[in-house]
Amino acid sequence: MLGPDHIRSRLKEALRHCPAGSDADIYLTASVQALTRFANNRIHQNVAHQDAVAHVRVATGFRQGRSATNNLSAEGLASAVRQAAEYARLMPEDPDFPGLPEPSGVQSVSAYDEATAVCAADRRADVVGTVCRRAADLALEAAGFCRTGLTEFAVASTRGADAYHVGTFAGLLITARGDDSAGWSKGGGWRLDNIDSEALTDEAISKAVKGRNPRDLEPGEYPVVLEHYAVDDMLEALSFYGMGAHMVQDGRSWMNGVLGEHVMSPLVHISDNGLDAAGWPMPFDAEGVAKQRVDIVSDGVASGPVHNTYTGAKEGKASTGHQRGATGGPTATNLFMRPGDQTTEELIASVDRGLYITRFYYTRLAHNRGCVMTGMTRDGTFLIEGGELTVPVKNLRFTQSYVDALTGCRALSSAAHLNLNEAGVAMHVPAALLDSWRFTGQTV
């Protein structure tokens, strides 16, 4: 870990090389990650790496120039600032550029766990060993990974921004496979000890066992109970394909034409909150702007997207602190979907005939409007008959508007789970019962 004092002194020193009459900011990320990977019921790889990147932006009038470097020495950072200044001089003017943001009051939020930060390979191996032994006992093959690490974030600017945050992360992913079946589970967060590895092992293994001898099922529209992994996929797609103001302003969002309208069930309430410790907290964005809680879908109504400084200025609004990364537009990456009041078992019991789906796989955007996605089910798809899981079914392909599907949200589970992906995007979501999902065929 580089530490806040070292980072701050280096960034402030580098900013002195910003030319007179210009402004500059530096967004730095530094990470340390260790990964224990396993397959065929044995560990086959244990690796660790660390990296740090400083992203420099220099603004001269309505022009911006950018550079990036892994060289965090005084000369390396100074060279990056000078390079960005030269690029700014050569760039065309952007009359919509409002300049760099003024500093905002950034809250401190805890997301650091020392035991996770210094986790030894032996500790990860203990977790993986339990998974592999239990899979072998049932003639299954287990594969996946256990990872731990930390990431530091810092922003400094000539306007006075001075923000620093460090967060740890941990993750366990398990696939248990048999001859004709598979089960899957995943857990993540910022404390390894909060990941229930035994429960995740049970989940993956039980689905692989129950999924043996899957049956064919005719394509068509079915009510579905989606496990939280599948709901996570839905929210991630809705975020990346429309919750950022740049997509709305460009006419590429599923929100276009429906802002302020009921587009989903009143049960659906989706917010972004980088300060909630139940997610993966991050108190500021890549511009150093404090993150604000944003209600994106309020009781089924499309309330509005998240902003960075650029998109906010185009509408006369303040940034909500959602610039993700040095380039690109604002993105909602700390999403929460309000849970309901039923257990997953109760969701299943309310379906006369439908499907229970563990997760989606290989989902891709087919159309922006309505966030129409294509993909397939995977690792645990079962027929529901008379309110009970009866037989496993072969995986199915689908083409479905995620917005339309959530219009038919009939109930949500009371338990919500944190899904943290490898890009640092956190989704805290429940399981969901939806009236209809359109399946177009079987997988090969």
Image (spheres, rainbow, N blue to C red):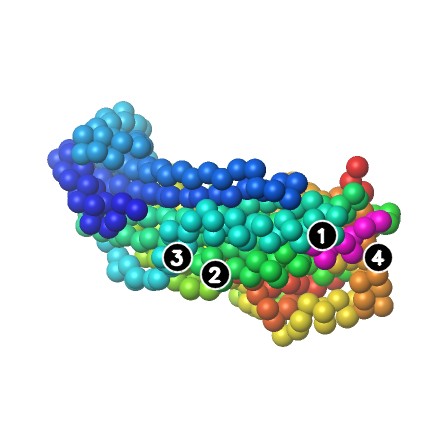
Judging depth in this view, the residue of 125 and 198 nearest the camera is: 125
Q: Are marks 3 and 2 in contact (CB under 8 Å)?
A: yes
Residue at horizontal 30 percent and vertical 62 percent from the top: 107
| Mark 3: few/some/many CA within 10 Å (<14, 14-19, 20+) | some
Q: Are marks 3 and 4 in contact (CB under 8 Å)?
A: no
What residue is disc 1 on? 137
* Amino acid found under the numbered disc labelled 2: Asp
Q: Report, in whole angstroms, how far the alpha carbon at label 3 lies from the one at label 1.
A: 31 Å
Q: Nearer the viewer, mark 1 or mark 2?
A: 1
Q: Give the residues in magenta.
A: 204-214
Q: Is residue 26 above or below residue 168?
A: above
Q: Report, in whole angstroms, how far the alpha carbon at label 3 lies from the one at label 4.
A: 42 Å
| Mark 1: few/some/many CA within 10 Å (<14, 14-19, 20+) | few
Q: Report, in whole angstroms, how far the alpha carbon at label 3 lies from the one at label 2.
A: 9 Å
Residue at horizontal 22 percent and vertical 30 percent from the top: 76
The label number, if any, that marks residue 115 in the structure image = 3
What residue is disc 2 on? 193
Write down the quadrant of residue 276 in the picture: bottom left
Q: Secondary structure at mark 1?
A: helix
Magenta stretch mostly in which secondary structure?
Answer: helix
* Amino acid found under the numbered disc labelled 3: Ala
Horizontal side, residue 321 vs residue 3: left or right? right
Q: Report, in whole angstroms, how far the alpha carbon at label 1 lies from the one at label 4.
A: 23 Å
Write down the quadrant of residue 228 in the picture: bottom right
What residue is disc 4 on? 391
